[in-house]
Image (cartoon, rainbow, N blue to C red):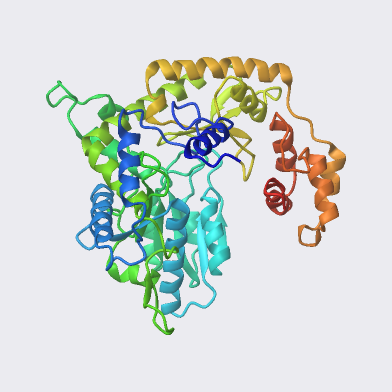
């Protein structure tokens, strides 16, 4: 094996060639592209300058404190924080959500709650269910309105008990891009003396700056309202809402920083203290952590700080305005494509597209779009939400001509998907699945089930994902949850 730097970098480039593109706006999930020149280069340089700095001990590396206080302060100012608002920089939305739940559990324990519950909408992100499993809380899922996909405050109120440690609302929910009624839910939580967390991981930076754009005069038009002012109606969602006790916002989404950057905000330092870990009863150095990580590179923090400073509030407001306008154009355009419609009324930049034509299946639509060079994320049906494809609109796809290109591709893909027809699921397989107990499945039964779903022995999926997704969608959720890790395990040779 050639171990020269040139050969190793060439190998990495070859491996990347098989991945989805992370720039250009055609990958409409997982990645976020500002489309601005020089941002990536700045982030890479800042990351490299701090890559070796260990954020474990801020007394040894005081630059970490300065950078983190600055980043947290910018987030707090944007998202309704007051004089006492504090926060912590984390590795991403999942860690921010985990820490919010962990803090709430410790807070509840101080109140004598021994069997804490986590009340959340059926549309809440999976990270909260992960937190409940890791930290020993019982999740209490509340259904959402089947038309708007927003949770109803009265349903949350009815679910609150003396054991409730935390209530979660989304701004917006990932699946449909709608903002829950934060003010009404937070008021209900406050009446019960319960903490309320706003998951604004994906939408907080966009919505906060969209609100800023809507409040600003239109450029060159004196005090006359601009497009953003006329159209953008940002619901109440942040720490300025009475009863909201914490909020998470990712910077590696609509702040367009490199991956590994999120902020968890608390209304005050007293609440944050419940989430700290400290240990001195061992012969080594005293340990204190505000995050789940111990040792961590300061590279993502420095990169985030540099990008936030470079783009600035006015720059983000303009990017949010563009994304908002593009999202409205996309939603309107989808309404003109035969068989397709948008679920709910998106408040942010996330759009879920379903089909009203039984011959046009969303999973097949996603396959056809991928053949046309676009990645749309399939979302299986659940709790009244039908099968659909998810689109995350970023600044890189916000130009009118790019939205027109996307809409044209959707129209072509819809025609092709209709000709292909929906994926078929063997009724016998579904019947067999209903008899299986996920907790007692052995390796032989798991292998049989994965083979039937079209997953290869090496974890490889067939060229078209629709048949596999249709099978997984038809299975009971607990059985799917038993099989999905096995698919990943096969990929890694397990």
Q: Which of 195 and 255 is in front in this view?
A: 255
Quarter of the view holding residue 46: top left
Give residue 161's position: percent from left, percent from top.
Answer: 50, 69
Q: Is residue 25 above or below residue 486?
A: above
Left or right of residue 185, residue 319 in this image = left
Residue at the (30%, 36%) spot, across then down? 210
Give residue 312's position: percent from left, percent from top.
Answer: 23, 39
Q: Is residue 85 above or below residue 174?
A: below
Quarter of the view holding residue 460: top right
Give residue 420's position: percent from left, percent from top.
Answer: 73, 19
> Would you say residue 435 is visible in this rendering?
no
Q: Is residue 220 above or below residue 148?
A: above
Task: Kindly give the residue lying farthest to the left in the view shown.
Answer: 222
Left or right of residue 149, residue 476 in this image = right
Left or right of residue 424, residue 142 in this image = left
Residue at the (30%, 48%) spot, across then down? 49
Figure label count: 0
Residue at the (51%, 21%) spot, across then down? 334
> Would you say residue 289 is visible in this rendering?
yes
Give residue 366's position: percent from left, percent from top.
Answer: 61, 28
Quarter that holds the N terminus: top right
Residue at the (82%, 42%) spot, across then down? 451
Left or right of residue 2, residue 47 in this image = left
Q: Which of 1 and 354 is in front in this view?
A: 1
Q: Which of 392 and 233 is in front in this view?
A: 392
């Amino acid at each position: 094996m050639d171990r020269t730097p040139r050969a190793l970098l060439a190998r990495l480039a070859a491996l990347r060639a098989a991945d989805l593109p992370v720039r250009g706006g055609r990958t409409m999930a997982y990645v976020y592209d500002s489309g601005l020149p020089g941002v990536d280069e700045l982030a890479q340089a800042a990351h490299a300058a701090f890559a070796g700095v260990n954020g474990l001990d801020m007394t040894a590396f005081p630059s970490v404190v300065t950078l983190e206080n600055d980043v947290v302060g910018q987030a707090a100012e944007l998202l309704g924080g007051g004089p006492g608002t504090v926060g912590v920089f984390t590795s991403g939305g999942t860690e921010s959500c985990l820490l919010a739940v962990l803090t709430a559990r410790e807070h509840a324990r101080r109140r004598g709650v021994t069997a804490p519950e986590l009340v959340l909408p059926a549309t809440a992100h999976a990270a909260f269910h992960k937190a409940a499993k890791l930290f020993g809380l019982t999740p209490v899922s509340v259904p959402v309105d089947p038309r708007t996909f927003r949770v109803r405050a009265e349903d949350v109120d009815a679910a609150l008990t003396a054991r409730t440690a935390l209530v979660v609302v989304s701004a917006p929910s990932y699946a449909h891009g709608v903002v829950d009624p934060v003010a009404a839910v937070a008021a209900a939580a406050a009446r019960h003396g319960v903490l309320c967390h706003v998951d604004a991981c994906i939408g907080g930076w966009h919505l906060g700056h969209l609100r800023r754009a809507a409040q600003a005069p239109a450029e060159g038009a004196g005090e006359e309202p601009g497009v953003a002012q006329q159209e953008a109606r940002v619901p109440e969602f942040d720490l300025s809402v009475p009863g909201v006790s914490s909020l998470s916002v990712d910077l590696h989404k609509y702040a367009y920083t490199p991956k590994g950057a999120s902020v968890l905000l608390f209304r005050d330092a007293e609440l944050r203290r419940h989430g700290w870990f400290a240990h001195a009863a061992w012969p080594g150095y005293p340990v204190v952590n505000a995050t789940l990580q111990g040792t961590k590179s300061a590279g993502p923090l420095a990169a985030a700080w540099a990008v936030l400073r470079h783009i600035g509030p006015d720059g983000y407001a303009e990017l949010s305005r563009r994304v908002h306008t593009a999202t409205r154009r996309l939603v309107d355009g989808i309404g003109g494509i035969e068989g397709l419609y948008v679920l709910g009324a998106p408040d942010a930049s996330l759009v879920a597209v379903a089909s009203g034509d039984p011959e046009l299946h969303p999973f097949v639509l996603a396959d056809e779009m991928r053949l046309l060079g676009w990645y749309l994320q399939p979302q299986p049906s659940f709790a009244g939400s039908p099968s659909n494809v998810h689109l995350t609109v970023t600044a890189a796809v916000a130009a009118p001509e790019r939205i027109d290109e996307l809409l044209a591709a959707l129209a072509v893909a819809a025609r092709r998907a209709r000709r292909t027809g929906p994926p078929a699921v063997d009724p016998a397989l579904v019947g067999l699945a209903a008899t299986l107990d996920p907790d007692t499945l052995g390796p032989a039964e798991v292998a049989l089930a994965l083979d039937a779903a079209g997953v290869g022995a090496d974890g490889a999926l067939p060229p078209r994902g629709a048949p596999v997704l249709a099978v997984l969608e038809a299975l009971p959720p607990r059985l799917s949850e038993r099989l999905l890790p096995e698919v990943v395990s096969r990929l890694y040779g397990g």
